[in-house]
Amino acid sequence: KKDLWALDNFEIGRPLGRGKFGNVYLAREKSSHVILALKVMFKVELSRAGISHQVQREVEIQTHLRHPNVLRMYGYFHCDKRVYLLLEYARHGELYKVLRSQPNSRFTEYHSANYIAQLVSALKYLHSKKVIHRDLKPENILIAANGQLKIADFGWSVWSPNERRTTLCGTLDYLPPEMIEGCKYDEKVDIWSLGVLCYEFVCGKPSFEAAKKSETFKRIARVDIRFPQFLTDEVIDLICKLQEILNLSNIRSTERWPERLNIIASAKESTPVFLQPWGSCI
Ligand SMILES: CC[C@@H](NC(=O)c1cc2[nH]nc(NC(=O)c3ccc(N4CCN(C)CC4)cc3)c2s1)c1ccccc1
């Protein structure tokens, strides 16, 4: 395990992804020929946006995580202008592009069940380490060999419990009420996002999508979720249970937590939730 890496240890390939604060390139380590992804960020942009502490936390968290559905970070190095993160290469790219390329931009329930099960496994691991991802969305999930999902981009992750200090940017779609209302929250925010992801896998759009941010905000706060008729009762039941976890604020106690995860694991056998005529869950 080498501690001090430098740019000339690597041959840089094509750009893999472009983000607000940096780009990711295909790279190969010269002596071992290991293929990886090199994420390059400019220090001045990070400090200008006041997120240098987030990158330090991203490195601190992700370098210590070891799980088949969490993208590995092998290490990092920096020079005067840039920070470089050495990341695992996921050869099938970004989940959201595969999702959008499906007919009606959605997966079958069978396909979705496999993906959700992998994400549950990753979240159980992260939460056992008291890590909250906080930014779970299709853009942050990659697909590696043999259809293995990898949760990536821990730039917004924190140690649980936590109170958000940095202003939110990007889509609100996947955030639970307590995060958009800016109060205390814990790892259950990731389970809320998982519910939105599950909805998006089987419906082709996130649960609370609206034309304007203010509309999305209202729909999230009211948990104003509606289900298309083509969904089975089982997947509706699972999504409702993923969203209700954060709604019944009385279950702050963590001992209910393992039971909740069992619900997710056994969603198939559960009794279908009784739907209101307009299709939302009670
Ligand atoms: C998750 C977002 C984050 N990304 C990473 O950290 C990323 C880490 C990481 N490891 N491997 C990746 N692989 C790819 O990005 C990739 C993309 C397309 C591919 N294909 C195109 C379609 N073709 C049919 C198959 C091959 C294959 C691999 C990425 S992205 C990020 C953050 C900031 C700035 C840019 C990117």
Image: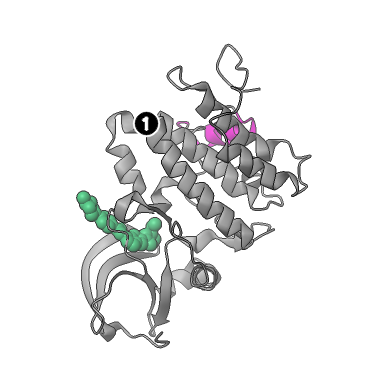
Residue extent of the magenta highlight:
210-223
Badge 1 crowding class, 10 Å Cα cut-off, few under 14, some 14 to 19, many 20 or more, is few
Quadrant field for ligand 1: bottom left
In the displayed structure, 73 sits above or below 70; it is below
Mark 1 Cβ and ligand 1 under 8 Å apart: no
Residue 164: x %, y % from top left: 64, 57
Q: Which residue is mark 1?
A: 108
> Which part of the image, by quadrant, shows the N terminus?
bottom left
Along the horizontal axis of the image, is 164 left or right of 208?
right
Tag 1, which secondary structure?
loop
Along the horizontal axis of the image, is 155 left or right of 142?
right
Amino acid type for the residue under numbered disc 1: Thr
Along the horizontal axis of the image, is 121 left or right of 203?
right
Along the horizontal axis of the image, is 218 left or right of 103?
right
One can see residue 205 in this view: no
Query: In terms of depth relative to the viewer, which is nearer, 138 or 19?
Result: 138
Query: In terms of depth relative to the viewer, which is nearer, 56 or 147?
Result: 147
In the displayed structure, 250 sits above or below 120; it is above
Residue 108's image quarter? top left
In the displayed structure, 165 sits above or below 98; it is below
| Magenta stretch, overall SS | helix
